[in-house]
Amino acid sequence: MALLSLNNLSVRYRGASLALDGVSFEVPENAIVALLGPNGAGKTTALRAISGLLSHHGGGEVGGSIEYDGRPLTGRTATRVRAGIAQVMEGRRVFPDLSVEENLLCGGFTRPRTGLGSGLDEVYALFPDLVGRRQDMAGLLSGGQQQMVAVGRALMSDPRLLLLDEPSLGLAPMVIQQIAGALNQINERGASVLLVEQNATLALALSSSACILETGRVAITGASRDLKDDPKVREAYLGQGVGAAA
Ligand SMILES: Nc1ncnc2c1ncn2[C@@H]1O[C@H](COP(=O)(O)OP(=O)(O)OP(=O)(O)O)[C@@H](O)[C@H]1O
């Protein structure tokens, strides 16, 4: 059974045209799935629908359905059903005047009381760069370190599904590799990841399957290893036209 499934999902923002038009895809248990596509394709809208944030962005009519762990993400129980989902929004959004550790602890507020500790040790093990900065104001960190705080804060709730919106945006290659390594480790420990990325090469390397959106519809979907070799995908999304080196 899929952990998350979008079934014929449509979203229309108030006073605007359809942002998503009959989108269906799944995130299996314990998988990394990439959600790709050009600017305006509807990737962030899909994340907002899953995390329940559409109403904070001009609302919208929603059609179709989303199921998480076999239960619908609609109606009065949706907030409770979403308890296992954590999101890292585009642009990092750390609390700049709180310390690194305070930022992380904010994310642990809904952590299940498993008796396994606060989660801080796991986050510091994933991102050793943060250990020496734990008492520093998060706003003073580099962009890459702030992204580590944002991902770490989401992990503090011990989610089964992590939603990430453009985690590599504006970061140096070495930092991107660290974040990618952390996502692999999170996945190895059993969590699923839905990864929205403009960097399709990175996303296809990290994920087992991918869904490519274009103007609100699913254009291509399949196993990431197949999509990496698909001439249409290479030309349109990987910047590798016919005859380009692999
Ligand atoms: N709050 C909003 N109100 C009205 N229209 C919106 C709103 N947010 C997004 N849209 C529109 O919905 C469509 C999908 O936007 P969305 O941000 O989901 O795309 P995206 O694939 O995430 O793009 P990007 O890669 O540029 O972030 C676009 O046409 C956009 O203009």
Image (cartoon, helix red, strand yellow):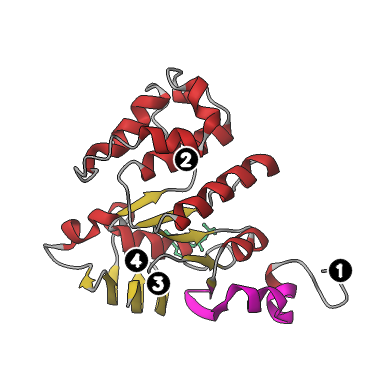
Indicate which disc, 2 or 3, sits on the residue closer to the N terminus.
Answer: 3
* Residue picked out by circle 1: 245
Distance, label 2 to label 1, CA atoms, is 34 Å
| Residue mark closest to the camera, 4 vs 1 | 1
Question: Measuring 68% from the left and 76% from the top, which residue is drawn there?
Answer: 233
| Residue mark closest to the camera, 4 vs 2 | 2
Question: Measuring 34% from the left and 66% from the top, which residue is drawn there?
Answer: 15
* Residue picked out by circle 4: 15
Q: Position of residue 78 (x, y in %)?
A: 18, 62
Indicate which disc, 4 or 2, sits on the residue closer to the N terminus.
Answer: 4
* Residue picked out by circle 3: 28
Distance, label 2 to label 3, CA atoms, is 26 Å
Q: From what the image shows, is residue 114 above or below residue 22?
A: above
**Crowding at label 4, few (<14), some or many (≥20) Cα neighbours within 10 Å?**
few
Q: Mark 3 is on which residue type?
A: Pro
Label 4 beta carbon less than 8 Å to ligand 1: yes
Indicate which disc, 4 or 3, sits on the residue closer to the N terminus.
Answer: 4
SS type, badge 3: strand
Q: Mark 2 is on which residue type?
A: Arg
Residue 32 shown in magenta: no
Distance, label 4 to label 2, CA atoms, is 29 Å
Distance, label 4 to label 3, CA atoms, is 34 Å
* Residue picked out by circle 2: 92
Residue range in magenta is 210-235
| Residue mark closest to the camera, 4 vs 3 | 3
Q: Position of residue 162 (x, y in %)?
A: 39, 55
State which quarter of the image contains the N terminus.
bottom left
Label 3 beta carbon less than 8 Å to ligand 1: no
Asked if labels 2 and 4 touch by Cβ distance under 8 angstroms, the answer is no
